[in-house]
């Protein structure tokens, strides 16, 4: 006897552990302190705890196969045996793909749609032979059943998995068909196939083809196709022609007009946002469910993107706590809405994206270059992106030492960082950021209008977690934030030291932002605070200031028709923050894992003197004709997300490739990103090779 889809569910759940248990187990395994059995046991325990807690909260439909030891897209690649040959002989091919080995670089990593979650990009080539490997979803299904829970396996949808390789769709569908049939044989009633690509322009033909084929299978589970991160209206007609049994839609972006094509089928209404930490308005949510004709209630997407629970946050202001909901609280909202049911009512008006106002300007680049000549930088100057390794001693000092002792400890660490860079021969130094817990949280702690959590961890990638601040009121800067330690570091060396700031777009993108003000307005408030910091750094004698915007691409709307307006105000915010700098002050910016070539015009419009971008994993992706190469460019030559040390010849090869599109006079040499997560031994070895490569190349391009 078949059953109807449960009336309440979530599309996914956090997986790092309430106390970051998976992070510690992963790092223990990578360092050799834990064996694989201990790592797997941690995963098993976290899965069991998640199912138990969701059941206790009253959720009717529990998902499985949403847990991952590193990344769900990497899991999907393994499930169809899309493992490049060069990794197959590694002791652990899974983590070799994610982190690289001594001999083989890791696979490319980039942002998951418009989120700050990083995923491993599958490498699909002519030699890729897809094969069904259903071990993981079947194993988690059995685990849940042993604990008394019947679950709905979740798979990454085939169209989203391929994205840029849709010519291989039929080959991939053969493997998906085998996985679905294996799950059916195991007695699975429903399978969820995640297709966030449904909200992106142009995916409809592939969706139609894929789900006609999969829905035509004999002996398969019922199919729930889940879209999220936007309104899927454009692609819904293509999906509706396939006889899939259900669709899950993100109603926080409005009710798709074409959803009526699914009348009579299961419609799962995602009315509780999985992307922010604000409580849902119950009346609005019920009205959205009624307008959508929803038969079940869910989150808009996986709750992977929010912290576990407010129960671990006794320090938040009481007036703010009453407005918040983390993952557990959002599950409770879903359950309550399912019990109340839909109720017709007024729907919220969708905010319109407005373009930026006039863009502030500095003097032309040629004038600035002349004014900066007394920096006396060599050809191919070597620098880093900002942070140096954060040792366990520094992290303990931050929470344990009295202020005076802590300040002395930070000064000593800055001395160490400056000495290390001097010894290695870097040309533009950094102070290493030992006083900063995070590139956004640190600024949030010093700006009015933000609150920070104690345990509000969110997975960024693998074992890496962040604590996004909560931007809940008007933003202002009561005092200088970075000047003290930048000035101290500069006093320790004759070489220029960069002042390090996080840009306004990134501060906003990596925070949970108040819903009662337009995003552009909030970002401009942050830009004003950053502008004040730039002026104070200049006044303190800092000649090079880096204002990072790694999230510029991240906030880009998924629909092309909305992108120009966003980029206009995002660029305006950055230039508002930096345009007050003098011509003699060299402004740098940094974008990492953000598909820089896709927004080159906007990067050019930022008007920074030097732009550093991720390139070690993804390649430069630029051409000599790009206008964005009119200023300094630092393509990353060292992948800091991997423990692998690049050799001198490898770095030289990358730099020679960069010189094909970037004139030597504008080429900078730097890692992909900050060095915070690496060890000093790794950093010394890697930077020594980077410096040696730059010196070797200087001799041939003088």
Image: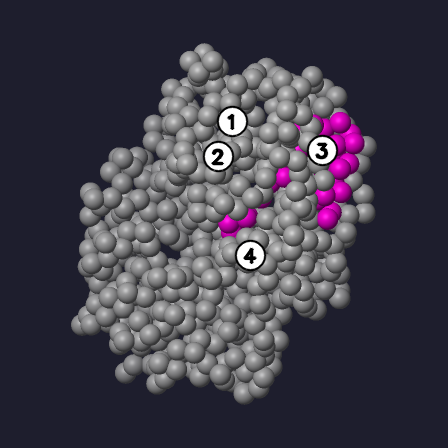
Tell me what residue is drawn at x 40 percent, y 78 percent. 259
Which of pointers 4 and 2 lies earlier in the amino acid sequence?
A: 4
Q: Do the numbered discs 4 and 1 sit on residues whose CB atoms are within 8 Å?
A: no
Pointer 3: what residue?
A: 582
Whether residue 143 can be seen here: no
The secondary element bearing badge 1 is classed as helix
Left or right of 217? Residue 469 is right
Tell me what residue is drawn at x 62 percent, y 35 percent. 364
- The circle drawn on residue 629 is 2
The secondary element bearing badge 3 is classed as loop
Where are the magenta residues, as a range?
528-555
**Color theme of the render:** one colour
Of circles 4 and 2, which is in front? 2
The spot of residue 629 in percent (x, y) is 48, 34
Which of pointers 3 and 4 lies earlier in the amino acid sequence?
A: 4
Which of pointers 3 and 2 lies earlier in the amino acid sequence?
A: 3
């Amino acid at each position: 006897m078949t059953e109807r889809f449960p009336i309440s569910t979530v599309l996914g759940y956090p997986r790092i552990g309430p106390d970051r248990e998976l992070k510690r187990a992963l790092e223990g395994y990578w360092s050799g302190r834990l064996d694989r059995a201990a790592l797997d046991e941690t995963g098993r325990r976290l899965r069991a705890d998640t199912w138990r807690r969701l059941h206790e909260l009253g959720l009717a439909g529990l998902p499985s196969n949403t847990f991952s030891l590193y990344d769900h897209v990497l899991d999907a690649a393994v499930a169809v045996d899309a493992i490049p040959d060069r990794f197959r002989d590694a002791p652990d091919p899974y983590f070799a793909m994610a982190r690289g080995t001594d001999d083989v670089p890791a696979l490319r990593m980039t942002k998951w749609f418009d989120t700050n979650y990083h995923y491993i990009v599958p490498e699909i080539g002519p030699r890729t032979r897809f094969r069904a490997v259903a071990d993981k979803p079947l194993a988690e299904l059995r685990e849940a059943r042993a604990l008394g829970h019947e679950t709905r396996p979740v798979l990454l949808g085939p169209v989203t998995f391929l994205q840029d390789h849709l010519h291989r769709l039929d080959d991939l569908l053969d493997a998906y068909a085998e996985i679905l049939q294996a799950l059916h044989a195991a007695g699975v009633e429903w399978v969820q196939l995640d297709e966030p690509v449904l909200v992106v322009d142009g995916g409809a033909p592939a969706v139609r083809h894929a789900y006609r084929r999969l829905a035509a299978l004999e002996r398969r589970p019922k199919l729930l196709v889940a879209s999220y991160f936007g309104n899927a209206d454009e692609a819904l007609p293509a999906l509706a022609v396939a006889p899939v049994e259900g669709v899950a839609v993100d109603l926080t972006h409005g009710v798709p007009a074409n959803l009526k094509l699914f009348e009579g089928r299961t419609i799962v209404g995602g009315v509780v946002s999985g992307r922010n930490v604000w409580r849902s308005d119950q009346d609005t949510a019920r009205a959205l469910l009624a307008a959508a004709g929803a038969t079940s209630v869910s989150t808009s997407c996986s709750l992977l993107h929010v912290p576990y629970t407010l129960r671990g946050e006794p320090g938040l202001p009481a007036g703010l706590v009453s407005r918040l909901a983390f993952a557990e609280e959002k599950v409770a909202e879903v359950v309550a809405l399912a019990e109340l049911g839909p109720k017709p009512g007024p729907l919220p008006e969708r905010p319109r994206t407005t373009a930026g106002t006039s863009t502030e300007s500095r003097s032309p680049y040629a004038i600035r270059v002349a004014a900066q000549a007394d920096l006396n930088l060599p050809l191919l100057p070597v620098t880093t992106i900002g942070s140096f390794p954060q040792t366990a001693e520094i992290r303990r000092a931050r929470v344990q030492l009295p202020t005076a002792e802590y300040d002395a400890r930070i000064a000593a660490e800055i001395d160490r960082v400056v000495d290390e860079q001097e010894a290695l021969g870097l040309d533009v130094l950094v102070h290493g950021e030992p006083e900063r817990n995070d590139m956004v949280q640190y600024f949030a702690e010093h700006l009015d209008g933000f609150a920070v959590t104690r345990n509000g961890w969110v997975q960024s990638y693998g074992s890496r977690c962040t604590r996004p601040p909560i931007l809940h009121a008007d933003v202002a800067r009561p005092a200088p934030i970075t000047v003290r330690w930048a000035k101290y570091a500069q006093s320790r060396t004759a070489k220029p030291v960069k002042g390090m700031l996080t840009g306004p777009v990134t501060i906003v993108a990596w925070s949970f932002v108040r819903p009662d003000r337009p995003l552009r307005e909030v970002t401009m408030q942050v830009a004003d605070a950053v502008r004040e910091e730039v002026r104070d750094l200049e006044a303190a004698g800092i000649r090079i200031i880096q204002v990072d915007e790694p999230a510029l691409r991240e906030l880009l709307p998924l629909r092309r028709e909305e992108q120009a307006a966003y980029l206009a105000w995002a660029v305006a915010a950055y230039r508002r923050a930096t345009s007050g700098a003098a011509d003699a002050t060299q402004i740098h910016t940094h974008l990492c894992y953000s598909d820089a070539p896709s927004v080159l015009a906007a990067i050019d419009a930022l008007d920074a003197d030097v732009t550093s971008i991720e390139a070690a994993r993804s390649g430069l992706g630029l051409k000599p004709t790009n206008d964005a190469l009119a200023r300094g460019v630092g393509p990353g030559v060292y992948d800091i997300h991997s423990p692998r040390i690049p050799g001198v010849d490898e770095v030289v090869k990358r730099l020679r490739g960069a010189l094909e599109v970037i004139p030597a006079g504008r080429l900078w040499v730097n890692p992909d990103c900050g060095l915070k997560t690496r060890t000093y031994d790794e950093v010394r070895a890697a930077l020594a090779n980077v410096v040696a490569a730059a010196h070797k190349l200087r001799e041939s391009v003088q």
